[in-house]
């Protein structure tokens, strides 16, 4: 989701100053304009350096004339680059989110997201304030994830205590209570007999879609689709974009075919009564 929202949006134009350091070029708003060229600088205050006995305006040689302002032109070597933390590819996006989850500098990333516009366009202050909710939601989820780690450690300790009990009980139940729970689970957890459709064609399709090789094939396609989506990156060549688009159509056709076969073999009620089918169909 972060790549879909911010891929290429954290980039802007820089130029190399006299010392060779990269400096923001705020006058350039689009990547197409971030090219090497002359730049007019106006309203520069003249200043006299007492150590070198010179004026910052090379045309002035005396201190008495080194006053007011002057205009000049300079040749700038420009470069369009992204910030250190960005969503240009899946690896940078994971690194950015990991750094945010540590709460170290996450507000700086949020401000960059709020200022972002679109790929190949320089950021603009407070361009999209509502996007801050994306970063706030992630921080809440990330903190809950850390909380769940601590809860997992506590539950693991409870399980270890139960194994060391020795009387067949657990950390929170006696032996008799645990046996009662097991009996209730056996009574209520009986398997439901699967009912196949009477129509021979639907029956054959039903048995086909529930076979393990078919499930493994769909799982393999899902993994390939995930890898394909993760291989997208900012400023990628058109040939790679076209290849990903074609693969997307192919994987989409496979998923639609899977859902169609299952809906045909099962009636919609049986299909959507399965939570995995609902997740597969809507997500």
Image: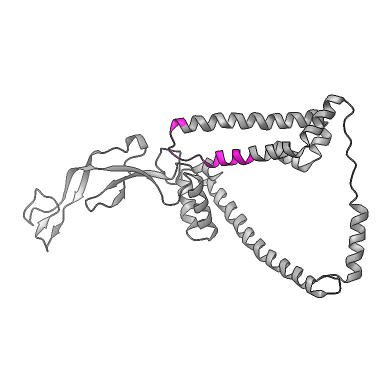
- The quarter in which the N terminus is drawn is top right
Percent across and percent down for residue 155 are 73, 66
Among the 4 quarters of the image, the one containing residue 76: top left
- The quarter in which the C terminus is drawn is top right
Position of 172 relative to 276 (above/below): below
Colour scheme employed for the rendering of this structure: one colour
Position of 76 relative to 49 (above/below): above
* Residue shown at 66% from the left, 66% from the top: 150
Percent across and percent down for residue 245 are 54, 30
Q: Residue furthest front?
A: 213
Q: Nearer the viewer, residue 163 or 120?
A: 163
Q: Is residue 283 visible?
A: no
The magenta region covers 222-239
Percent across and percent down for residue 7 are 48, 42
* Residue shown at 47% from the left, 40% from the top: 233
Q: Is residue 121 left or right of residue 97?
A: left
Percent across and percent down for residue 106 are 50, 56
Among the 4 quarters of the image, the one containing residue 143: bottom right
Q: Nearer the viewer, residue 21 or 114?
A: 21
* Residue shown at 44% from the left, 31% from the top: 238
* Residue shown at 29% from the left, 46% from the top: 15
Q: Is residue 227 magenta?
A: yes
């Amino acid at each position: 989701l972060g790549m879909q929202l911010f891929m290429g949006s954290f980039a802007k134009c820089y130029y190399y100053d006299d010392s060779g350091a990269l400096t923001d070029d705020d006058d350039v708003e689009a990547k197409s304009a971030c090219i090497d060229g002359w730049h007019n600088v106006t309203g520069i205050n003249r200043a006299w350096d007492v150590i070198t006995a010179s004026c910052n305006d090379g045309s002035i040689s005396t201190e008495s004339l080194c006053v007011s302002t002057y205009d000049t032109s300079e040749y700038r070597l420009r470069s369009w680059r992204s910030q250190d933390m960005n969503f240009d590819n899946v690896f940078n996006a994971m690194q950015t989110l990991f750094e945010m989850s540590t709460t170290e500098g996450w507000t700086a990333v949020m401000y960059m997201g709020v200022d972002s516009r679109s790929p190949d366009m320089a950021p603009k202050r407070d361009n999209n304030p509502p996007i801050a909710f994306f970063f706030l939601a992630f921080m809440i989820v990330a903190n809950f994830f850390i909380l769940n780690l601590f809860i997992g450690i506590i539950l693991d300790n409870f399980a270890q205590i139960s194994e060391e009990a020795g009387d067949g009980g657990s950390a929170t139940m006696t032996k008799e209570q645990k046996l009662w729970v097991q009996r209730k689970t056996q009574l209520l957890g009986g398997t439901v007999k699967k009912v196949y459709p009477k129509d021979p064609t639907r029956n054959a399709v039903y048995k086909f879609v529930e076979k393990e090789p078919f499930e493994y094939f769909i799982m393999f396609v899902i993994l390939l689709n995930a890898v394909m989506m993760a291989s997208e990156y900012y400023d990628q060549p058109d040939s790679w974009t076209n290849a990903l688009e074609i693969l997307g159509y192919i994987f989409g056709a496979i998923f639609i075919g899977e859902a169609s076969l299952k809906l045909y073999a099962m009636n919609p009620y049986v299909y959507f009564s399965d939570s995995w089918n609902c997740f597969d169909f809507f997500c």
